[in-house]
Image (cartoon, coloured by chain):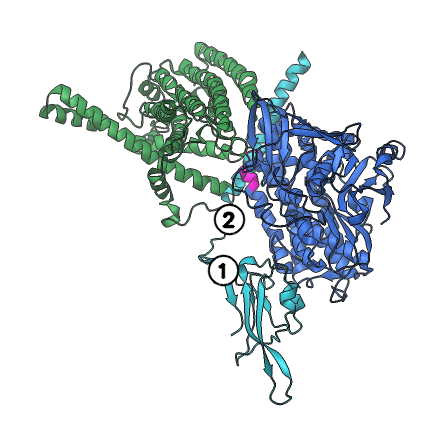
Amino acid sequence: MNITFIQPEKFREQMEYLRRERGMDFLRELVGMDWGEEGIGAVYMLENSETKENVQVATRSTNREAPAIPTVSDIWKIAEMYEREAFDFFGIIFTGHPDLRRLFLRNDWVGYPLRKDYDESEELNPVRMFSENVENDCTHTLAPDGTLQRNPDTLFDNNEYIINIGPQHPATHGVLRFRLSLEGEVIKKTDVHCGYIHRGVEKISERLTYPQILALTDRLDYLSAHQNRHALCMCIENAMDVEVTERTQYIRTIMDELQRIDSHLLFISCAAMDLGALTTFIYGFRDREKILDIFEEVTGGRLIQNYNVIGGVQADITATFAEKVKAFCKYIPKKIKEYNDVFTNNIITRKRMVGVGVLGRDEAISFGCTGGTGRASGWACDVRKRHPYALYDKVDFKEVIYQNGDSFSRYLVRIDEIMESVRIIEQLIDNIPEGDYKVKTKPVIRIPEGSYHATVEGSRGEFGVFIESRGEKSPYRIKFRPMGLPLVACMGTLLNGNKIADLMTIGATLDYVIPDIDR
Amino acid sequence: MYDFSIITTAIDQFLRSLMPSALATFLECVLIAVCVLVAYVLLAIVMIFMERKVCAAFQCRLGPMRVGFWGLLQVFADVFKMIIKEIIDFKRTDNLLYNLAPFLVVLSSVLTFSCLPFANGIEVLDFNVGLFFIMATSSFGVLGIMLAGWSSNNKFSMIGAMRSGAQMVSYELSIGLSMLTLVALSGTLQLSEIVARQADMWFIFKGHLPALTAFIIYLIAGNAETNRGPFDLPEAESELTAGYHTEYSGMGFGFFYVAEFMNLFIVSGIAATIFLGGWMPLHVPGLDAFNATMDYIPGPVWFFGKTFFVIWLLMWIKWTFPRLRIDQVITLEWKYLMPIGLVNLLIMTLCVVMGWTF
Amino acid sequence: MKRERYTYLSTVTFALKSLLSGLKVTLTEFFTPKVTEQYPENRKTLKISERHRARLTMPHDENGANRCIACGLCQNACPNGSISIVTKSVTDEETGKSKKVLVSYEYDLGCCMFCQLCVNACPKNAIEFCNDFENAVYDRKKLVQKLNR
């Protein structure tokens, strides 16, 4: 992967040029990076949503004390969150950023953990037994004399009625926290707090071997466990020039789609539960159990499957696999009809979802909301179509796209995608070729020096893996593109002016998974 | 038809022969209070068990199966747990109101409960404005909920209580209107008299279309009045965690819980009484042999049978539908139920005046 | 005006229709057989997949011997350090060469994440996962198991 380096002084200008003249409207990833001697900075991966053209640029500052890079958060809205993450991990100061706070770590954390010279001693960052004080907004501006100035600002007034949704709240699907300023039932302002399940996967990975990192990917977005691992395996295989067998490709594709159905069934169930229809929730889980049984039989795990390995899959499919999958493909359309009868077509569901939380196409691209959310807003963002991998260029399936961008479209996209996934599986399941399920790889896996990138379509968006290798057994820097962070980033825009009950509708239909956001 | 007033009169006469009349009255009051409370608690336990099993059946599950045969003792275990749980005091609550609120809620529902005519002769309170009294007592339960939400000093509770206030006050109208429709048909407010006048045919058949409409409106409004799904916004667990009773523990919470279930029973009981004939057996005019056979089934069986049927209907609704949003709840009441209820009342009055009833 | 009345009425009819179709579904489910699995009463009929990874075991043959050669590859492969091997050097009497022998193979179930890397790394297939999933204990220390006999 080629990365073009730009001087920080010219960086703003170049980025504006890329956005305006070359139509790079989708910021795929922003990878903070510590190049050591050469400086601290970030890699930006951009894509033109029309032509699918990709550009990778990077900028870095040699000032290790306070590396300053101009912000691009006004060009791509999602950059606001990504830059907060880079600030959190690398201490990069994005000048002009409207709200440069730590994103995942506590406000009182000492040091920037992903820097190579980070001091890990426990005296600096002990387990603190008190809660952090909520820091106010702050921006950094570059004063005329070249020093950075911190401009604190208050997010909420003292006389605002602020309620806390989360971190322990049934509607946040995990440990996410919103602070809402209310006026009666109407939400006036939203502030998102992430990091309650931050495990530092990227930091841990820097000292693990590649096969060991694979064990962590299932635990990012546990509802896209297969796709996540697929992405990392693909990235490593591409880097090492390993060609996997056709059988492996078939198995991987089928498993990915089963995983997608699994995730979407859970989505329907949880959306129903958030809207108060507990019965539909149980129905969804009842049917999801059938997929989990298939997973358990083939992979040995229900949620954490550990199936893909570098060069293939862990074990060959079982004899009854095809039969069971076919039975499931027959079974699920009937059940979808049942969900439609009891929930989708229900007048209450319609009233709760239609027209609530509208995300426009341009906004979806600017926020980088891929997956079902982006497609509900009319953005053809399916990685399976944009950058086909595995067998997706050989199978016939439709990219489900809705134009309205409201909660109901987001919900319908998932329902339709289940049917498309069933179609993909039906095309493949009878034709799995004979062959090895795994090619032999070297006992110790080393990736040649360079930067590598691979993406797959996860259950809720584009899941990307970026590896910077120095030829060692472990990566120099590994970055997973979170599918959920853009979705959470756009919550503020979608919520303001809606009611508390709409928070549940919007949150449920955006379909984020917290361990994937926090990593 | 069985007449249970024979038993009650016998007890009354027995007591009066033993002691002065004033003491006997006092003793009877105590006796009745104990009976009502015991019945209240036992019915609540039955209802909780029923809710669990019915909900499980709708959801393709089995429900509680561990404690006792078919989980029969599960609710007793839960009640026991609730009783021995610590009641937690909070520093910044409004203590008096905080402790008063659960009692207000239970008081309102016990008072309403004691008005129900369980069988011929088993009526605790029976006077000429019975239905009006029921309306009055059942509607002050909202006071307790509002107090609970306010005094807990919790923002979730507060929002829950405000929702509950808006909702219950609104739906009171529809309940009143649909009851009024039936009063227009029956011509009396006295509950025993209402049941007696359904001897030839239940009101829901007698009043045909307008009565049926009133019944449906009553079910919807009654569901909203008891804060049950799809109108359970005051305690919407996916939004407000538990709403107005978030901060209550032990029996404080227990009272709210029991009162909620008993309010469901009361709403269904009233529906059974004024629409489905209460303890009155099913009578079809002209089929005397059939009517006589039906009379062999005692009144309480009819009353509880009908009541639990209505409860089952309400549970069926609760476990099928998603929850509404607060503005939709209010819209449903003021734009749909109330106008339809008013028109319905007009039609019913017309029917009664013109004699278009069976 | 006329149009508005039409939408009002059509809303009511659509609402009733959609609600009734929902009620129909739940009513059918009310009478269908239930799917609850009554664990632990159903232990006898419970089927756990062969490949399910519940606990690491070291199979022993009838003589009580295992295939472990104490090479330590599994210990190195484990991302969590849940395996620790204690070895000693023994001199072979026939050849006179010294070789490593396993003394104790300690496996901490508490920090295992069932990634199967140890099993993949083993050159002699001396360890494997079994599907006996009932591993709950009251004391964390009991999770540290000695696998060799």
Q: Nearer the viewer, residue B197 or A58?
A: A58
- Residue most extreme to the bottom: C94
Residue C33, label in figure: 2
Instruction: Provide the letter of the chain coloured green.
Output: B
Does the stretch in magenta take in A277?
A: yes
Q: Is residue C131 above or below residue B51?
A: below
- Residue at image point 73% right, 67% down: A443
Does the stretch in magenta take in A72?
A: no
Q: Which residue is mark 1?
A: C134
Which label sits in the foreground, 1 or 2?
1
Range shown magenta: A275-281
Instruction: Report x, y in % for residue A518.
Output: 65, 43
Instruction: Report x, y in % for residue A51.
Output: 87, 39
Instruction: Provide the letter of the chain coloured blue.
Output: A
Three-letter residue code for mark 2: Pro
Residue A333, label in figure: none
Crowd class of label 2 (few under 14; some 14 to 19; many from 20; radius 10 Å): few
Instruction: Provide the letter of the chain coloured cyan.
Output: C
